[in-house]
Amino acid sequence: MAKTTRGSATIKGAAGPDRRRVLKAASALTLGAAAGTLGFPAIVRSAQARRFLKPLVAGLNAKEGDPTYNSVSLVPKILREKYDVQLEFQIHPASSLGTDLSQLDAVQTGFIDITSNTTQQFSQYDKSFDVVDLPYIFTDWDMFYRVAKSDVWKKQAAAFEAKVPVKVLPPVGAGGFRLLSNNVRPLPEPGAVQGLKFRSLTSALDVDMFKAWGGNPTPIPWTEVYTALQQRVVNGYHVQPIWTFQFKHYEVLKYATEVKATFSIQFQVMNINTWKSIPEAIQKPLLMAFEEAAQIANEQDRKAEDFYKAELKKKGMEIYAPSAAELGKWRDAGEKVWATAGKDIDKGLIASLAKMRST
């Protein structure tokens, strides 16, 4: 297992030829901003920096350099340079500690301290954040920024923490809007979906959305998706451009449609006992560091969304942008999920989010 040390973050995972290549190519619009943000002014350091001696283990599904990787890996540097706090992260990227669901289980038992994944993946533990995964509830990145800082998000985070043994950390974007991709035919409108098999998440919202579009959903762990597409166990999926590119799924996919249904949010959490073991004098700067790292990652992710779509096109994928009329058909079908899998979501909560939508 390759091991690289950068500042106070230890990165563990299998080495690979493409781990840094793509983000390096996109550096002008991504990591350049992060470097500028991390150029903190000199601070007056105490005689002895505050330290937390136990390294925190993070099991992530992102590859090194991805935005949702940076939203964690940058935290020790920010803590050290801006808040005079010494804390080490041992980071295991690219699902090297197990599948998405096994890492979500592991953070609750304390086997790992930190993990992150899309909000939909957490719905099996508690449904407080199902509202943000309703199809077509989010309109754009600006709405996400407003929601992430809102009292609505804070209220839902408290509700989630009351049910699940974790501390909710600041959220980050996870690649923007998902593309509906497949390896059979173009999908200009929902009528073309009929009969196709799609890899889905375990979330009822995700399953019902595929059914509303006429597809056959099949929950499959992310680590098995490439093979499932290659062997035609499924024909496609609904996934962000960054993951389609980073995991080379363009090799087993041909067509994609910008259905604009689901804006992906990466939900970051820490084991509750780990959180409680951290002294209060460190907890506050730690949360502030996570917030700043999230801001850097979000800007990187926002600028990279179009970049990855362009890269997929270079690899031979056809990405179709529906007309207003066609997009209306996708939206009408997708919003039917609100009355099925979303029927138990608080209508007042939906109304609160609707007020934050961009016009």
Image (cartoon, helix red, strand yellow):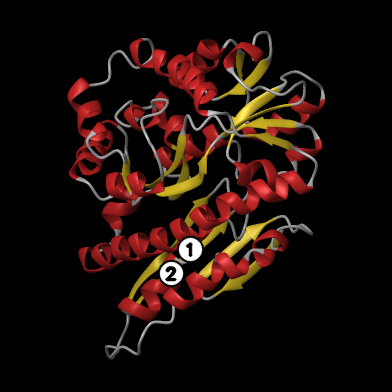
Residue 225 drawn above or below residue 143: above
Residue 262 drawn above or below residue 21: above
Residue drawn 42% across the image and 38% down it: 109
Q: Position of residue 44 (x, y in %)?
A: 28, 91
**In-front residue for pair 12/354:** 354
The count of marks equals 2
**In-front residue for pair 195/203:** 195
Task: Residue 140: tell me if it is visible.
Answer: yes
Q: Identify which amino acid the numbered label 2 is placed on.
A: Pro
Residue drawn 28% across the image and 48% down it: 146
Residue drawn 69% across the image and 63% down it: 20
Disc 2/disc 1 C-alpha distance (Å): 7 Å
**In-front residue for pair 86/214:** 214
Assign a secondary structure to mark 2.
helix
Q: Position of residue 278 (x, y in %)?
A: 29, 60
Residue 331 occupies quadrant: top left
Q: Position of residue 242 (x, y in %)?
A: 62, 47
Assign a secondary structure to mark 1.
strand
Determine which residue is flagged by label 1.
89
Quadrant position of the C terminus in the picture: top left
Q: Identify which amino acid the numbered label 1 is placed on.
A: Phe
Residue drawn 20% across the image and 33% down it: 352
Query: Is 175 left, or right, of 180 in this rendering?
Result: left
Residue 285 occupies quadrant: bottom left
Determine which residue is flagged by label 2.
76
**In-front residue for pair 135/113:** 135
Q: Which of pointers 2 and 1 lies earlier in the amino acid sequence?
A: 2
Task: Residue 8: tell me if it is visible.
Answer: no
Query: Is 244 left, or right, of 6 in this rendering?
Result: right
* Residues marked 2 and 1 touching at CB (< 8 Å): yes
Quadrant position of the N terminus in the picture: bottom right
Q: Residues within 10 Å of mark 1 (few under 14, many from 20)?
A: many
